[in-house]
Each structure stands twice: as structure tokens, then as C-alpha cells.
Amino acid sequence: MKANQSTIDRAVRGIVGTGLLLVGIVLVRGVFGILLDVIGAVLLFSGAVGFCHVYKVFHVDTSKKA
């Protein structure tokens, strides 16, 4: 898997993913809390590895220099 996310993209995914995980664990209960946890985990993982499968499907690559 070739990285297809820029550094800023990865940082935003990490921050948003962590926030969603915390909200899902601490504040929200039930199915919606689990959904927030799953979305947060996916964002956190994709930010950590620098690869997004959705970007690949749509041929998006934010890692390229402008």
C-alpha cells in the first residue's frame, strides 16, 4: 500500500478519530456510541498508516506536492 495522504490529512484524521473514540466511549452509550467508536478507529488507523481505501477507489492522492 502506497501512502496516499498528506501530513495534514493524517494529522486531521488522527485528531478527529481520537475525538470520536473518546466521545463514543465516555459520553455516548448504545449503538450510536459503538458507531462513533468504529468510525473513530477507522479514521485513527488510516491516519496512522497514511493510506485510505476510499481515496484509492476515487483515485485521490493528497500526498503529492502541489
Image: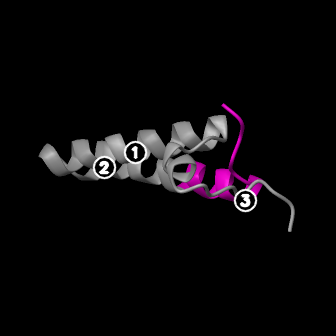
Dot 1 surroundings within 10 Å: few (below 14), some, or many (20 or more)?
many
Dot 3 amino acid type: Ile
**Front-lying residue, 2 or 11:** 2
Residue placed most toward the observer, 55 or 14: 55
Lower sequence index among marks 2 and 1? 1
Would you name the residue on which mark 3 appears? 8
Instruction: From the viewer's perspective, tell me whether residue 17 is left or right of residue 23.
Output: right
Q: Is residue 36 left or right of residue 55?
A: left
- Residue bearing mark 2: 36
For the residues marked 3 and 1, what is the alpha-carbon distance in whole angstroms? 20 Å
The CA distance from mark 2 to mark 1 is 6 Å
From the viewer's perspective, is the residue at label 3 or at label 2 nearer? 3
Assign the C terminus to one quadrant of the image. Answer: bottom right
**What is the three-letter code of the residue carrying label 2?**
Leu
Q: Residue furthest bottom?
A: 66
Name the quadrant of the N terminus: top right
Residue at 60%, 55% (x, y): give it: 59
Q: Which residues are magenta?
A: 1-15
Q: Is the Cβ of the residue at disc 3 closer than 8 Å to that at disc 2?
A: no
Q: Nearer the viewer, mark 3 or mark 1?
A: 3
Alpha-carbon span between mark 3 and mark 2: 22 Å
Choose the circle earlier in sequence order: 3 or 2: 3
Q: Check disc 3: other Cα within 10 Å, few if <14, some if 14-19, many if 20+.
A: few
Residue 47 falls within the magenta-colored stretch? no
The numbered disc on residue 21 is 1
Q: Amino acid at mark 1?
A: Leu
Q: Is residue 12 left or right of residue 38?
A: right
Secondary structure state at the residue bearing disc 1: helix
First in sequence: mark 3 vs mark 1: 3
Q: Residues within 10 Å of mark 2 (few under 14, many from 20)?
A: many
Across and down, in percent, residue 43 comes to: 49, 46
Q: Residue at x 25, y 46 (%)?
A: 35
